[in-house]
Amino acid sequence: VQLQASGGGLVQAGGSLRLSCAASGPIFTINRMAWYRQAPGKQREWVADIRSSRSTNYANSVKGRFTISRENAKNTVYLQMNNLQPEDTAVYYCNIASWWGQGTQVTVSS
């Protein structure tokens, strides 16, 4: 199984980005899909997750600004990020079941 993440980039504060992460390979049932991020010099932290029931959870730091969603037919998870702030700058990693994506850089300038 391979995960391919995309959608990162450079954006000004207040801007938006949409991350995508698609899983390919022999996957049958996926319950939890999630996004994590790791800022320079910091530990990787959980950002949001979504279950097969479509229930979602968010870290307090992104609640109200980020939206996680999924498209089961494509084994894909998305992260819509609005009102981005410089403190959101990090490498974002998708996590689907036990697999991890390669990370995509998000940089927010002030």
Image (spheres, rainbow, N blue to C red):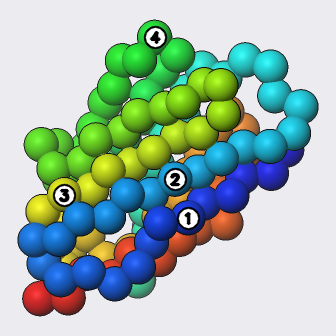
Tag 1–tag 4 contact (CB < 8 Å) = no
Helix, strand, or loop for circle 1? strand
- In the rendered structure, which amino acid carries the disc numbered 2? Ser
Label 4 and label 3: CA atoms lie apart by 24 Å
Residue type, label 4: Ser
Using the image, determine if residue 107 lies above or below residue 28: below
Mark drawn on residue 53: 4
Labels 1 and 4: the sequence-earlier one: 1
Where residue 33 sits, quadrant-wise, is top right
Q: Residue at x 23, y 65 (%)?
A: 16
Q: Earlier in the sequence, mark 4 or mark 2?
A: 2
> Is 12 left or right of 8, judged from the image as shown?
left
**CA gap, disc 2 and disc 1:** 5 Å
Say which element carries label 2: strand
Q: Give residue 6's mark.
A: 1
Q: Answer whether labels 4 and 3 touch (C-beta < 8 Å).
A: no
Residue at label 2? 20
Picture residue at 80% right of the left edge, 43% below the top: 24
Residue 40 in view: yes
Checking the image for residue 82, the label placed there is 3
Task: Report the mark closest to the observer, 4 or 3.
Answer: 3
Few, some or many residues within 10 Å of mark 3 (<14, 14–19, 20+): some
Label 3 vs label 2: CA separation? 15 Å
Q: Amino acid at mark 3?
A: Asn
In the image, farthest residue toward the right: 26
In x, y percent, where is residue 93?
54, 59
Q: Secondary structure at mark 4?
A: loop
Q: Amino acid at mark 1?
A: Ser
